[in-house]
Image (cartoon, helix red, strand yellow):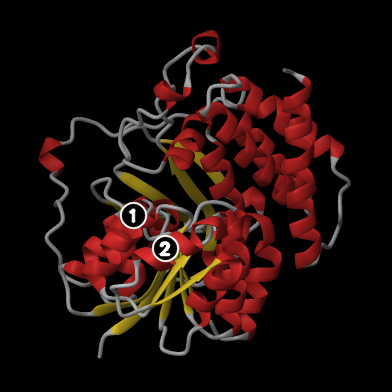
């Protein structure tokens, strides 16, 4: 029997690659497709995959979507209500959350309550509310399967092992497109330069985060909650070749690593078909073609966003949510080339200083902190004009 999948963020990089996987197998069928605003591509996907439900998050695009989908045999919805409907519908087995940003939080919570398996590509969910999400999933007997290549690697390295035997999580980072540049050279690089990632083809926001190393900072926070380890047990290692996707060091000093060609379809397939390993025709890693595997310590002076992310986790409470929201706003500004590279870290730090800390935030507190951080960043950016 085919697994029914709802894809939140179907027009993004992860969503498109997931649909490619579904095209190559008869093991899955699409129940719902959801996007932010790209309804033209959403309609193309619907014509090919025949979902029951289409959702556009941007409510202004609801009527155009409804009109464009008139020839299709499917329902149409919009906004957060639509995302939640896609995530909780009775026939759905797996919810792939690949939307960008904190809008993935509430659909994930409601999907967990509805006992859906979560294939998690939206790291902001655990960054902002990991302390709430993981106990909630445990209480409902729900599996959260990581789709990020690094967290998928760690998850695979932990299979069959006792949690109390883990010494360290070794979280690898490519270093991004500016890895070898000086701070002064990085300072003048524009978004168009930052979008040229050396190894991975990803969406614009995550590619900028990779350039600043904020992506690794968000993954650092996510790893803490996903794997139940302390921050002190997580180490970031820059590995420019992106062949080792992450490692786990055990207390006997054995290290288990997961290797593969840099292709996001590998962790996507693993999450969708876990615990099986479905045969596919993806590129095999050719060891004889590898010239070297190298490793470096991250430079927190050239890439201060990583340090800010780790600090937000140390502060705890609502601070990771503030960091995440501020970063989303600033990455959007950087993509528009209205701010510089190092303005991102500078203004995140200002937002974290300005927003009051909440020790044990509820979901409403996290959502309010998210909103306050965005308002503060917009205020600061307006002042600099």
**Upstream in sequence: badge 1 or badge 2:** 1
Q: Quadrant of the C terminus?
A: top right
Please state which of residues 69 and 202 is positioned toward the viewer in this rendering. 69
Q: Position of residue 144 (x, y in %)?
A: 50, 72
Please state which of residues 235 and 41 is positioned toward the viewer in this rendering. 41
Q: Residue, x 48% and y 33% (percent of image)?
A: 208
Q: Position of residue 264 (x, y in %)?
A: 31, 53
Q: What crowding class fits label 1: few (fewer than 14 Cα within 10 Å), some (14-19), or many (20 or more)?
A: some
Q: What crowding class fits label 2: few (fewer than 14 Cα within 10 Å), some (14-19), or many (20 or more)?
A: many
Quadrant housing residue 74:
bottom left
Quadrant housing residue 178:
top left
Q: Residue, x 50% and y 76% (percent of image)?
A: 87
| Residue 8 shows in this picture | no
Disc 1 on helix, strand or loop?
Answer: helix
Q: Position of residue 326 (x, y in %)?
A: 69, 40
Lateral position of residue 114 relative to residue 91, left or right: right
Look at the picture and state if 40 lies above or below 165. above
Please state which of residues 379 and 242 is positioned toward the viewer in this rendering. 379
Lateral position of residue 343 relative to residue 256, left or right: right
Q: Residue, x 56% and y 60% (percent of image)?
A: 59
Q: How many marks?
A: 2
Disc 2 on helix, strand or loop?
Answer: helix
Q: Position of residue 56 (x, y in %)?
A: 48, 62
Q: Mark 1 and mark 2: span between their CA atoms?
A: 8 Å
Q: Residue, x 11% and y 60% (percent of image)?
A: 281
Residue ID for mark 1:
40
- The image's mark for residue 10 is none
Residue ID for mark 2:
65
Look at the picture and state if 239 lies above or below 277. above
């Amino acid at each position: 029997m085919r697994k029914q999948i709802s894809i939140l963020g179907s027009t993004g990089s992860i969503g498109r690659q997931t649909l490619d996987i579904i095209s190559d197998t008869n093991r899955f069928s699409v129940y719902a497709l959801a996007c932010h605003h790209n309804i033209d591509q959403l309609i193309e996907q619907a014509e090919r995959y025949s979902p029951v439900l289409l959702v556009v998050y941007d409510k202004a695009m609801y009527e155009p979507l409804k009109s464009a989908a008139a020839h299709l045999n499917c329902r149409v919805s919009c906004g957060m209500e639509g995302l939640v409907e896609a995530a909780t519908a009775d026939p759905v087995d797996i919810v792939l959350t690949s939307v960008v940003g904190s809008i993935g939080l509430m659909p994930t919570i409601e999907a967990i309550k509805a006992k859906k398996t979560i294939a998690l590509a939206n790291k902001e969910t655990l960054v902002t509310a990991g302390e709430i999400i993981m106990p909630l999933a445990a209480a409902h007997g729900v599996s959260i399967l990581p789709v990020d290549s690094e967290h998928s690697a760690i998850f695979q390295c932990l299979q069959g092992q006792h949690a109390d035997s883990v010494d360290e999580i070794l979280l690898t980072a490519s270093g991004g497109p500016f890895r070898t540049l000086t701070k002064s050279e990085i300072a003048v690089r524009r978004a168009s330069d930052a979008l040229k990632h050396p190894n991975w083809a990803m969406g614009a926001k995550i590619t900028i985060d990779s350039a600043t190393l904020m992506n690794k900072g968000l993954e650092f926070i996510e790893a803490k909650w996903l794997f139940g380890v302390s921050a002190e047990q997580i180490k970031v290692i820059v590995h420019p070749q992106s062949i080792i996707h992450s490692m786990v060091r055990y207390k006997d000093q054995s290290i288990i690593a997961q290797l593969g060609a840099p292709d996001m379809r590998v962790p996507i397939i693993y999450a969708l078909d876990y615990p099986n390993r479905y045969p596919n025709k993806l590129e095999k890693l050719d060891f004889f073609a590898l010239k070297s595997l190298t490793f470096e310590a991250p430079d927190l002076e050239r890439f201060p966003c990583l340090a800010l992310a780790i600090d937000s986790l140390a502060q705890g409470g609502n601070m990771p949510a503030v960091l995440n929201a501020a970063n989303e706003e600033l990455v959007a500004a950087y993509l528009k080339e209205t701010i510089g590279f190092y303005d991102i870290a500078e203004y995140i730090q200002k937002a974290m200083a300005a927003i009051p800390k909440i020790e044990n935030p509820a979901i409403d507190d996290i959502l309010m902190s998210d909103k306050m951080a965005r308002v503060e960043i917009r205020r600061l950016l307006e002042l600099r004009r």
